[in-house]
Image: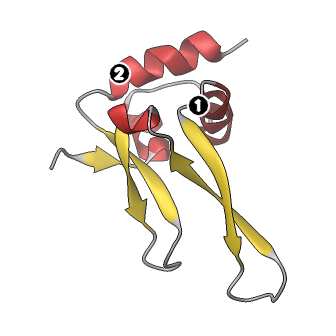
Amino acid sequence: MENTDAITNLLKQHKADISAVKANKILVALGLLLEKERPSSKYAGKMKKYKALSDQGLEYGVNVENPNSPGQTTPHYFIDTFEQLLVLIQQGVK
């Protein structure tokens, strides 16, 4: 399996002048990232939001199951191809 990392770490490593929150919003707008919901384990009737890579987004990373929240994923991006994804993110900054 290719080496992956969280977007926050990769943005820092590439000295990108953009927050993970903003980058995620751009990835959602590009259709590479989806906003999903699951029932909260703490609060009955509440929904917990999380992000997952879409089928298209899986070209740039994998959905890693969150060990603290079974059934919830966290996107991790391929280290080798993150620069290509960063170009798309930066093009989406307006």
- Residue 33 pos. (x, y %): 56, 39
Considering only vertical position in the picture, is 84 above or below 38? Answer: above
Q: Nearer the viewer, residue 19 or 82?
A: 82
Residue at (63% x, 15% y) in the render? 92
Q: What amino acid does circle 2 point to?
A: Glu
Residue under the point 61% across and 38% down: 24
Q: Mark 1 against mark 2, which lies toward the viewer? A: 1
Q: Nearer the viewer, residue 28 or 56?
A: 56
Q: Earlier in the sequence, mark 1 or mark 2?
A: 1
Check whether the beta carbons of the residues at disc 1 and disc 2 lie within 8 A of each other. Answer: no
Give amino acid for label 1.
Leu
Per the rendering, the mark at residue 83 is 2
Residue at numbered disc 1: 27
Question: In percent of the image, x 28 and y 47: which residue is there?
Answer: 4
Horizontal and vertical percent for residue 75?
Answer: 46, 50
- The quadrant of the image that shows the C terminus is top right
Determine whether the residue tagged by mark 1 lies in a helix, strand or loop. helix
The 10 Å Cα crowd at callout 2, few under 14, some 14 to 19, many 20 or more, is some
Separation of residues labelled 1 and 2 (CA atoms): 14 Å
82 lies left or right of 12: left
User: Seen in the image, is 46 located left or right of residue 33?
Assistant: right
Q: Secondary structure at mark 2?
A: helix
Q: Nearer the viewer, residue 77 or 9?
A: 77
- At a point 44% along the width and 39% down the height, the residue shown is 55
Picture quadrant where residue 61 is located: top left
